[in-house]
Image (spheres, grey):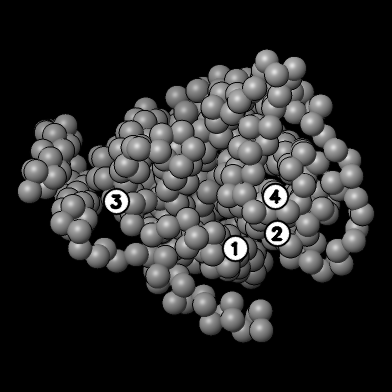
Amino acid sequence: MLPTVKINSYQFLVLVILFTIGTSILVIPSALAANAKQDAWIAAILGMGIGLLIVWLFTKIGLWFPNLTYIQVNKTLFGKWIGNIFSLLFIFMTFLYTAILLYYSGSFLTIHVMPNTPMAATNILFAIILVMAIRLGLETIARSAEIFIAIFFILFFILVVFIAPEVEFKNIQPVLEIDINKIFQSSLPLIVVSSLNTISLLMIFPAFINRPSSAKKHFLIGNLIGGLIVTIITILCILVLGSDMTALQMFPSYELAKKINIGNFVTRIEAMMAALWIICLYFKMVIYFYAAVFGLAQMFQLKDYRPLTYPLGMIVVILSLVIFPNNLEQSVYDTTIDIYFSLTICLLLPLLMVVVYAIRKKQLQKLRKHRN
Amino acid sequence: MLKSAGILLVAAVILFIEVPSLLEKKHKKELIVFSILLAIGVGLSIAYSFGSAIPNPIDLLTFIYKPLHDAITR
């Protein structure tokens, strides 16, 4: 059997918060502002609400089998062959997202912080700490997340307080000018990135937590807190930069940090603020990679997942380098193909699981009694 | 050439770290999966270092979902 470690539900809450904020804090404000203009904050709140519903569905799925991970649930529900195909799709998705996030971090660092460094260098460095985290195991990841969430909230507080003098309320007027359809449409990227993709947490959620039933509450609360932080950042972006500037920027919240100016003394502290994004990005990446590696090990019924980490880390670096030729392709992918892909794997498959579970409920209960 | 040598060196280090303990514990299945993945990794890395095109999963996804996207947005 694979090694089993348990984390407590508070640690899980921290992981959910970091996962929900993840890349959303960096790129979502511009995606929201592209269609919804100055009403992007309404779209953010709407997305948060719908996201909570989706997370509720995931917790339901997780609590059917409190001792199994998502891969094993797939196998029990659909049988060996179809279950494994679905698991393979899930692993493919998490692995691809690891590479995409690695690309994000690489392009963020090479564009804004270290322009003369080739992307391969930053990506390899990032992949090394990624592999290190996975090898040390879930408990270490959760404990370090507990420490980093404090740093995250301190930095976030500093950002919000320091940017407050720059706020101009005329930027969000007129409110509700855009029709409601467009607002819904533009909230879709937020739903996908911060709520639908939390399906990766189903690799941790019921099986590796002390008390799964209290963790269910924390799953929802964590998603809510993460959503609120993304909403606050979006509101600040709109209020400070204006909707057009927000939509044009690739990393609007980084531009936001550049605007900080307290008495011509506290200026240009965006490099410090970059720590915010690196922390979130890193933990989201770790969870994706953990889901991919652990999922693969469980699918092949291996005794240990650690041997797979180095080769997969190698592949992930190469994939992150070839995956997008430039930032334009990445933003086109993010706003079109990625949404359909995530909807298929993170919403269509779970709904299929609900249907199959409803049909096979009695049979499965008999099976469980038999096993006990 | 230098790049490929570096990649092979990295692969050798990985082999050195993983294989002895796997052989000791007689984890045969792990060893097979590990070897296949490492071979893919080394192959892709060397192909990348020579500048040849590597299959991109995004292209596959675009091929699958593009007709759907066009049908919805039209």
Provide the chain ID for the residue under circle 2. Answer: A
Q: Mark 4 or mark 1: which comes first in sequence?
A: 4
Query: Looking at this view, is B11 or A261 the one in front?
Result: A261
As drawn, the label of residue A34 is 2
Q: Nearer the viewer, mark 3 or mark 2?
A: 2
The residue drawn where x is 40% and y is 38% is A115
Q: Are marks 4 and 2 on the same chain?
A: yes
Q: Nearer the viewer, residue A303 or A53?
A: A53
Q: CA distance from mark 4 to mark 2?
A: 10 Å
Residue A15 visible (yes or no): no
State the separation of the CA atoms marked 2 and 1: 10 Å
Q: Please tell me which residue is depicted at 16% across the width and 32% down the height of the picture.
A: B17
Q: Indicate the amino acid at tag 3.
A: Ile
**Secondary structure type for disc 4:** helix
Query: Which label lies toward us, 4 or 1?
Result: 4
Disc 4 versus disc 3: distance between alpha carbons? 33 Å
Which amino acid type corresponds to the residue marked 4 in the rendered image? Met
Which sits earlier in the primary sequence, circle 2 or circle 1?
2
Q: Which residue occupies 26% across, 63% down?
A: B54
Mark 4 and mark 2 residues within 8 Å of each other at the beta carbon = no
Q: Chain of mark 1?
A: A
- Secondary structure at badge 1 equals helix
Per the rendering, the mark at residue A335 is 1
Q: Earlier in the sequence, mark 4 or mark 3?
A: 4
Indicate which disc residue A318 carries: 3
Identify the residue position indicated by label 4 in the image: A245
Percent from the top left, x then y, of residue A138?
45, 31
Circle 4: is it few (<14), some (14-19), or many (20+) Cα within 10 Å?
A: some
